[in-house]
Image (cartoon, helix red, strand yellow):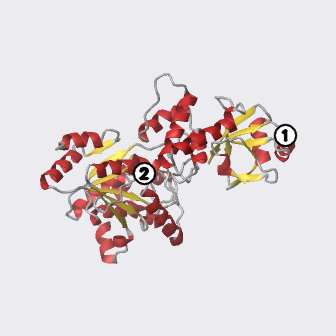
Amino acid sequence: MESAASKSTLLVRNAAEDLPAGALLAKLELAQKEGRQLRIKLGLDPTAPDIHLGHTVVLTKLREFQDQGHRVVLIVGDYTARVGDPSGRSETRPVLSLEEIITNAKSYEAQAGRILDQDPERYELRFNSEWLDMPMADLLALVRTTTVAQLLEREDFSKRYKAGSPISVLELLYPLMQGYDSVAIASDVEVGGTDQTFNILLGRDIQRHYGVPEQSVITMPILPGIDGVDKMSKTKGNEIAIEAGADEMFGRTMRLPDAAMDTWFQLLAIPSPAAGTGPRDAKVALAKAIVERFHDSAAADAAEAQFVSQFVEHEVPDEVEDFSFKADGASVHLPLVLADAFGVSRSEARRLVEQGGVKVDGSAVDVDKLDVDAELLSGAVVQIGRRRFKRFQIVR
């Protein structure tokens, strides 16, 4: 039988932190002694309809626990989504409608099944409305577990408080609600991104208040989006959905800055190319591996061929200068942003659009559309004429 120590080493090998130090090993040793599974928790709030590559970093870690014989409890936060996780936020998050939450939750359940083993012996799906729709007496008992001072230790809350920015009482409840999830499902281990460290550790405190054994904590590094800077997020428009088509998945991966490639290879558990491989070939290998994971090898080959046809054969340079633009709304006036990007007049930019002389990621812009979706341009290579290129980035 494989030792608990060797299992622990395997499970934490690419994690950011194992908290408290050695806690996972102790849990594994106890489970082995008692002959039982550990209950491994992950909570996902259905704030968007798609799971993206960023989510797969923690989902893959859960699959590793399953492969070791343990039971994953995936919590769809249909109640916490009504609050909105304030982690990393400088402002209150917009509230979703109940209809949006339910639709997104169904989508999450289906998509997570592409990574997790859904054998009932190793998988349990729960919705936290089961226990968070609680009587007032139970809510009062929950809020007694935590002080305002504790909550203001969170970096995002602390910054907003010092800046005089609004913090709603509802947002302050979010970490408590997430912590109570751990009580409700008797979590042994919680897995999450490093942005969730405060929430998950607070879950240990709340478990202790309720007399439940405290969970150990595994945090995973955050996968940057295709801009190579910000956390992958639908809100930022820098995501790759796991349900995306092969061509879109390949093309968006190819937008990734070279400096972020090593992080993607590591966090997505894709073997790095041989030493001496050039950046373009390395990125192609990365893009093909991602497409093959969620489609198949034939789709990966076809996506590569399509990309080569659009970009390589049309002589897009290896290095493309970035151009940042501000998008105040969902759409932008294309001639205006082209004029700023390429130093031409607005009338010249309009003429180029109307004559089919503007391409976004190799595809000609619809000549009848002068106002375009801002997210369409985010991270895209925009071309005017035969030899002028800029990679557009949105500044919010």
Residue, far front: 298
All told, the count of numbered labels is: 2
Q: Is residue 300 left or right of residue 117?
A: right
Give whichever of 382, 268 is nearer the camera. Answer: 268
Circle 1 is placed at which residue position?
345
Q: Residue at x 19, y 42 (%)?
A: 2
Q: Residue at x 82, y 37 (%)?
A: 344
Circle 2 is placed at which residue position?
158
Q: Is residue 134 left or right of residue 35?
A: right
Give whichever of 182, 164 is nearer the camera. Answer: 182
Question: SS at mark 2?
Answer: helix
Q: Nearer the viewer, mark 2 or mark 1?
A: 1
Q: Can residue 224 be seen?
A: no
Q: Disc 1 residue type?
A: Ser
Rendered image quadrant of residue 311: top right
Q: CA distance from mark 2 to mark 1?
A: 46 Å
Q: Residue at x 60, y 47 (%)?
A: 248
Q: Residue at x 50, y 61 (%)?
A: 47
Question: SS at mark 1?
Answer: loop
Q: Position of residue 118 (x, y in %)?
A: 36, 59
**Above or below, comparing residue 375 to residue 139 in the picture:** above
